[in-house]
Image: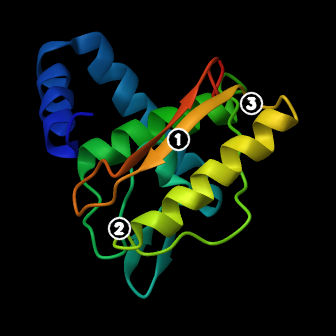
Amino acid sequence: MPLRHDYRTVINRTLKDDSTYRKYALGALEVLDQKPSLIVKFENGELKIPFIDIYCQAFQKDQVYFEDLIQTAIAWQHILHGQLIYRFIEVREKPYPNKEIKKNKRILVDMVEHYRMRNMYGLESADFWGGTQDADGYIKFSEPFITT
């Protein structure tokens, strides 16, 4: 899985080189301006974007980069216009800190078994290996989980 920094580099290059994408991305940012109470909140002077995890994992003290804002705005534009449907997958217990690898693996195995027995969401497998970088695990689906 590419690192968030690499992805931001690609987005910046695309913004610079592709005028169609640039117009689309900047238009998507207008969604944040049109529905600020739904999408953007300020808490203690910090920008909070509900469900930014649709696009990226933003840690509490992390800076939200312009590229993250663009990609989140594009996802929200699709959601608000009925072009993207998203779902939440519930797990039976709250995840543990990254260093608790065995406990987090158990949560994911339980989640896969739970939904597989009910033939829901096409979950195939999941794993967790922890770490301090962007990718610390995965969930694999046999069919797209988020559909357009």
Task: Name the residue: 35% across, 67% down.
Answer: 59
Label 3 sits on a secondary structure element that is loop
Query: Which quadrant holds residue 13?
Result: top left
Query: Which quadrant holds residue 51?
Result: bottom right
Mark 2–mark 3 distance (CA, rounded to whole Å): 27 Å
Between label 2 and label 3, give the one nearer the viewer.
Answer: 3
Label 1 sits on a secondary structure element that is strand
1 or 3: tag closer to the N-terminus: 3
Q: 114 or 17, which lies in front?
A: 114
The amino acid type, in three-letter code, at marker 2 is Phe
Q: Quadrant of the C terminus?
A: top right
The amino acid type, in three-letter code, at marker 1 is Ala
Residue position for label 2: 59
Q: Is 26 left or right of 122, judged from the image as shown?
A: left
Q: Are marks 1 and 3 in contact (CB under 8 Å)?
A: no
Q: 9 or 30, which lies in front?
A: 9
Q: Residue furthest bottom?
A: 44
Q: Looking at the picture, does residue 54 appear above or below residue 145?
A: below
Where residue 25 appears, as percent x and y from the top left, is: 36, 28
Residue position for label 3: 121
Where residue 137 appears, as percent x and y from the top left, is: 40, 47
Mark 2–mark 1 distance (CA, rounded to whole Å): 22 Å
Task: Name the residue: 25% across, 65% down.
Answer: 63
The amino acid type, in three-letter code, at marker 3 is Tyr
Q: Is 114 left or right of 88, judged from the image as shown?
A: right
2 or 1: tag closer to the N-terminus: 2
Q: Looking at the picture, does residue 108 appear above or below residue 121?
A: below
Residue position for label 1: 126
Q: Can residue 130 be seen in this view?
A: yes
